[in-house]
Amino acid sequence: MNCSRHDVVLLPIPFTDLSSQKVRPAVVLGHGSFPGDLFVVPITSQLANTDFPLNAWQAARLNVPCGIKSQICTIEDRLVRKVVGRLHPTDVATLQTHLRNWLGL
């Protein structure tokens, strides 16, 4: 699927015991150096488990208040089921600040 930076996408996320999976939202951070790879961070509605809340979650076309978790991962773009929205510029700025902190940049 064709995804761009800061798109909100739906993709299957496996349970930690790998017994099953659920389709969950994530934010695309960018494309990896290997063709077809995407860097993403998960979105959750469990606000207590987030690093920061999305202020414009409705603009991102999410159904409920959500936040971003600091679990950067690489996925194959073929796993993306759907692009549902895009982060609002204010949330993009907050994400970029957190990314610099998470990565020590």
Image (tube, helix red, strand yellow):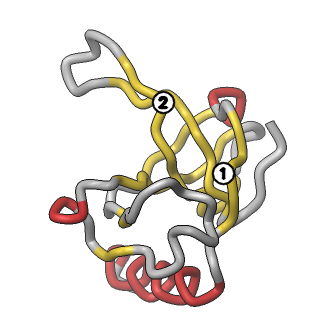
- Answer with the quarter of the image where residue 71 lies: bottom left
Q: Is residue 12 left or right of residue 5?
A: left
**Which badge, 1 or 2, is on the more N-terminal residue?**
2
Q: Is residue 62 left or right of residue 80?
A: left
Residue ID for mark 2: 23
Q: Is residue 22 above or below residue 80?
A: above
Residue nearest the observer in this picture, 86 or 34: 86
The spot of residue 4 in percent (x, y) is 77, 59
The spot of residue 49 in percent (x, y) is 19, 59
Residue nearest the observer in this picture, 62 or 41: 62
Q: Amino acid at mark 2?
A: Val
Few, some or many C-alpha atoms within 10 Å of disc 1 (few <14, some 14-19, many ≥20)? few
Few, some or many C-alpha atoms within 10 Å of disc 2 (few <14, some 14-19, many ≥20)? few
- The residues tagged by marks 1 and 2 sit, at their Cα atoms, a distance apart of 22 Å
Per the image, label 1 sits on a secondary structure element best described as loop
Residue nearest the observer in this picture, 57 or 74: 57
The quadrant of the picture occupied by the N terminus is: top right
Q: Is residue 84 left or right of residue 29?
A: right
At x 49% / y 28%, what residue is drawn? Answer: 12
Q: Is residue 71 above or below residue 20?
A: below
- Answer with the quarter of the image where residue 17 lies: top left
Q: Is residue 30 above or below residue 73?
A: below
Extreme residue in the top direction: 19
Label for residue 32?
Answer: 1
Residue nearest the observer in this picture, 38 or 33: 38
1 vs 2, front mark: 2
The quadrant of the picture occupied by the C terminus is: bottom left
Per the image, label 2 sits on a secondary structure element best described as strand
At x 66% / y 51%, what residue is drawn? Answer: 32
Extreme residue in the left direction: 48
